[in-house]
Structure formats: C-alpha cells, structure tokens
Amino acid sequence: MKKKMVVFDIDGTLLGSKKNVPFSTLEALTRLKQQGHTLFVATGRSLLYAKPIIQLLGFQNYIVCNGAIGFIEHKQTFGSELAADDLFSLLDKFSQLEVDSVIVTLNQLHRVSSFDLKKMREAMSYVGGSLPPLHDKKEELVYQVLAFYDHTVEQKIEPHFSKFDFVRWHEAGVDIIPTGGSKAATILELAEQMGFVKEDIVSFGDGLNDREMLQASGIGVAMGNASREVKGCADMVTNTNDDNGIFNALKKLSLI
C-alpha cells in the first residue's frame, strides 16, 4: 500500500464533543503509525493552544493558525506573518467599532482590548483557551489575529482589508490570516516538501475552515457532526466525532 499523508483537524474531529479523545481515535492513530503513514494536525488553533493535543497524541507534524505556520518533525518549515502596517490599520478599525481582538505570535497570545469579555471568553472556550493577558505587543511577528464579532459586523470590516482572509470558526469568532493562506495551501506546501502529491493526502475535518482542505486533498473526509455545507465539500462522510468517525473511515479506506 502506498503511504499516505493523513491530516486531522482538532476541534470537532480528533476531539469529541466533550473535548475528549475517543478511544477508537487513539487506536486509529496507533495503527496508522504502525502502517508507516505520515500524520499531521491542521488546526485553526494557535501553537500555544494546539500543543497539549499535539503532545498528547504524539504528532510530529502540524499546521497551526489556520495554515499560517507549519512544522515538520517539530521544526518550523513554513510561516506567513501579517504585514505590520495593515495589521495596525485593522486594529485601529476594531477599536473604532469596539471589536475585541487577540494577536497571535509564534508562542504567545495577547489580548488587545476588553470591550466584551463575555463574548471573548465564550468563543475562546471553544478552542480550549481562556482569556489571554491584556498587552498590546507589536514588536513580535504576528501570524494570526482572533477577532470577536458576529455576522452583522462583517461588512463593516472584511471588504476593507484585501491583504487579509477572514475565516469564521465560531458564531462570535473569526481568524484573520494573510490573503491566500489556509490549511489547504500549507498542507500542499508541506506535502511537496515531504515528497507527497495531492493524491496521497487524506484529510479529516468538520468546520468551515476545513472546506478548502477537504477539497484540496486526494480524499477529504467530513465528520458526521459537520454542517451540510462542509459535507458538500468532502469525498466521504463518516460518523460523528463521538461515534468512531475517524476509525470507521480509515477502515473503509483500508488504511488501518
């Protein structure tokens, strides 16, 4: 069997609805490694918030910040930061609209404002995080911004910043990354670095930020808990993240 590059989202995919890792998923990952496949995490989470899951499950390869940073065997081999001038303009706009934001550097998160702590806290809890410290640091490279606003505010912000892509991951949470950046783009970049072609890639996801990844893979697998829109981007739909979805799909694909 030709070895595959198998890519997993974290929230809603590797993790169950209670933020646990199902036993069947642990078994599936173990079998994939035994078969010699290359495993990746691809998440919207920052490195800081992804690291506990990466370490728990023994991943050596991972893509964080919705594709802004990529690692092979724990070494950063890809990075795309936000342009400083455009970033400052964006943060000024947020201040005018009283939109809270968090800047994400390689190893840290810093909250810029405190307009609606409840909204931020609820969104951050979805990715296993708490409120980052309030500190407007601008001297470090910024790979991602987390902004906290709902759909009613989108048109006041997003059309005015062509250098950024806005990727919604929560009703009140949006990731901001460089234009053209995505999990999909970075997966293809790292696949090339490792000698894989598109047909070798199998990806698993459930969220709106997984749509391009599923479409860009040789086989894209949507979890049963994904929305209809996400399922429509996949080649295959499996069971939910609480019902052995990863294990069952890999068995059907004869990868374990």
Image (cartoon, rainbow, N blue to C red):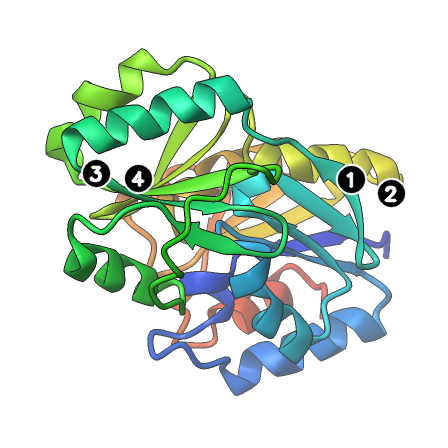
Residue that mark 1 sits on: 191
- Judged by depth in the image, the label closer to the viewer, 1 or 3, is 3
Q: Secondary structure at mark 2?
A: helix
Which numbered dot is residue 229? 4
- Judged by depth in the image, the label closer to the viewer, 4 or 3, is 3
Circle 3 residues within 10 Å: few <14, some 14–19, many ≥20: many
Q: Secondary structure at mark 3?
A: loop
Q: CA distance from mark 2 to mark 4?
A: 31 Å
Badge 2 amino acid: Met
Is 177 positioned to the left or the right of 80 in the image? left
Q: CA distance from mark 1 to mark 2?
A: 5 Å
User: Quick one: label 1 or label 3, which is nearer the N terminus?
Assistant: 3
Where on the picture, by quarter, is residue 39? bottom right
Residue 255, percent from left and from top: 72, 64
- Judged by depth in the image, the label closer to the viewer, 2 or 4, is 2
Residue that mark 3 sits on: 99
Residue 162, percent from left and from top: 41, 13
Badge 1 amino acid: Ala
User: Quick one: label 2 or label 3, which is nearer the N terminus?
Assistant: 3
Where on the picture, by quarter, is residue 157? top left
Residue that mark 2 sits on: 194
